[in-house]
Amino acid sequence: MTPQPDYDRLRRAIAGEVLEPASAGYDTARAMWNGAVDRHPAAILRCTATADVAAAVRFATDAQLPLTVRGGGHGFSGLAIADDSLLIDTSPMKRITVDRERSRAFAQPGVLGGELDRATQAHALATTLGTISHTGIAGLTLGGGWGWLMRQYGLTCDNLISAEVVLADGQTVRASEVAHPDLFWALRGGGGQFGAVTEYEYALHPLDPYVTVSQWVFAPDAGCRPLLTARDIAADPDRARDMFITSMCLPDSPQLPEHLRGARAYVILCMSTNTSDRDGAWMAPLAQHRPLAAVTGPRPYVDLQAIADLQNPHGLLAHCKGAFITELTDQALMTFVEQAEQLQGTSLMYLHQMGGAVGDVRDGETPLQCRSADYALNIVARWEDPEGEATARMFAGQAAAAFDRFGMDTVPLNFEGDPVGLESRIYGSSLPRLKEIKAKLDPHDVFGGAHPAVPEARVAAIADVRPGPSAVGV
């Protein structure tokens, strides 16, 4: 029998807190953004510095405890937390340093997207981050990182210059294209099972604090017509523009007319960094479809980055399925409408335009297998009570399957509600190299769980004792 871990010894070794199930604050610390993820670690280590993380890794190894690492905790699948594990919680680590002269940002893993955006925009700079401001940078980066600037500057992981990483043996290294290149390659989309990242260095790009935002709302009975027009508008190769096509319930917000609050609608949301687009002329063809509402004009970029926050509060119950659409054909959009008509409650579906700089990175340069995709599709099924969970999960799976004929044979790690068993679809031809790197850097599976890149020989045994797959949760 494995002896009970000596958490008092760990407390003496780190500056941060050690929370056990009976500790005040334990339940708050284990809560994830997705309320459907309800797991109970053996202990939670609220780390404040890289030294804390290294001490925690060594402690977990000595105590033979499974280990998970949490950044912002903003993940659908709960990759960052597992029952009866040691949770390294890096959310207190929030230092940000902006080097304006070199156009670089250095950020610790507890930093949220909105926090980094505000820090960089103070210098009229930015990097690609997610589209919800309380998403953490950690899992966002390690899973790829989709955002408004990706057509112009690539995915979040494409902007990663280096990373400070605590390895399975407790050693701390700085990975880049020059130093530890295999580790650096794996970190750019391969997930968090190769080590605990304690600092990210990003490339920054010039960005005016104001961008043009164009938002169009259509009734459900408008059907495909405005969506087809939106797709045709987005076919323009201008990389400064990006688009979302969403079927959703509008938020109960005072910013909306009262008759639209809570109503289901199609929302076409576009962004442009071109100052010449301020008049919205490029979106004018949508007017023929009689929108319920349409607003175009300059808006602070940091506000755009928080525009989806209200629809994505902490504690919601959700399951997500994702796909990459090779070409958004008429039939693909008709399928989108057909599936959208079956959405229940606050569930939503959206298409996010890709292309541009995303495709400039060749297959194999990162673990991701989505570079030639036209759009990313996400289906977010939600429920209010336990009785609705099975139905929501079934719908998400069936809706995703309806797009198989239009998509690539790969799925996004960060938008897959249950990635276990889907390693081939997530990583494709990158999987063999990821497994080799995993075996080299973490032969005893310290950062294990049932994560998709775990060597096959250990998956079954690990899954039996570690209910939650391990990675850094966004």
Image (cartoon, rainbow, N blue to C red):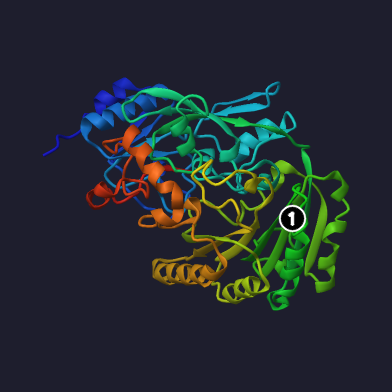
Q: In the displayed structure, would residue 310 be above or below residue 116?
A: below
Amino acid at the residue labelled 1 = Cys
Q: Residue furthest bottom?
A: 221
Q: In the displayed structure, would residue 251 be above or below residue 145?
A: below
Residue 113 seen by the camera: yes
Q: Label 1 belongs to which residue?
A: 270
State the image coordinates of residue 44 (x, y, percent, origin top left). 34, 37
Hey, which quadrant is residue 327 in on the image? bottom right
Residue sitting nearer the eye, 213 or 463: 463
State the image coordinates of residue 105 (x, y, percent, origin top left). 62, 28
Residue 257 seen by the camera: no
- At 70% from the left and 78% from the top, the residue drawn is 221
Q: Quadrant of the N terminus?
A: top left
State the image coordinates of residue 142 (x, y, percent, origin top left). 49, 41
Q: In the displayed structure, would residue 461 be above or below residue 115?
A: below
Q: Position of 241 compared to 61: left or right?
A: right
Hey, which quadrant is residue 58 in on the image? top left
Residue sitting nearer the eye, 26 or 405: 405
Q: How many marks?
A: 1
